[in-house]
């Protein structure tokens, strides 16, 4: 889902999607030294977690 240009089925059918949102979010989060994870169930839910890592 974090691949550049990825769009889900809904994005392709109903909207003009670029597939850049999650790609850019992951790049930004990683650049800041954190982590991002996504869990999704088709026709169910999508859960995104950003883990803010401490830099000691």
Image (cartoon, rainbow, N blue to C red):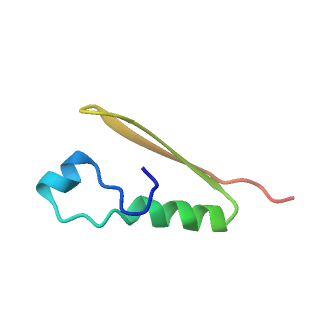
Residue 12, compared with residue 38, is above or below; it is: below
Q: Residue furthest left?
A: 14
x and y percentages locating residue 33 in the rendered image: 70, 62
x and y percentages locating residue 36 in the rendered image: 56, 51
Classify the position of the C terminus by image quarter.
Answer: bottom right
Q: Is residue 26 left or right of residue 7?
A: right
Q: How many marks?
A: 0
Residue 54, compared with residue 18, is above or below; it is: above
x and y percentages locating residue 3 in the rendered image: 45, 57
Q: Residue furthest right?
A: 56
Image point (43%, 59%), residue name: 22
Image point (36%, 62%), residue name: 5
Image point (30%, 55%), residue name: 7
x and y percentages locating residue 43 in the rendered image: 23, 32
Image point (49%, 63%), residue name: 25
Q: Is residue 46 left or right of residue 34?
A: left
Quarter of the view holding residue 45:
top left
Quarter of the view holding residue 46:
top left
């Amino acid at each position: 889902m974090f691949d550049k240009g990825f769009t889900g089925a809904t994005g392709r059918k109903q909207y003009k999607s670029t597939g850049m949102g999650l790609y850019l979010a992951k790049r930004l989060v990683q650049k800041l030294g954190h982590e991002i994870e996504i869990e999704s169930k088709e026709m169910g839910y999508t859960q995104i977690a950003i883990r803010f890592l401490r830099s000691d």
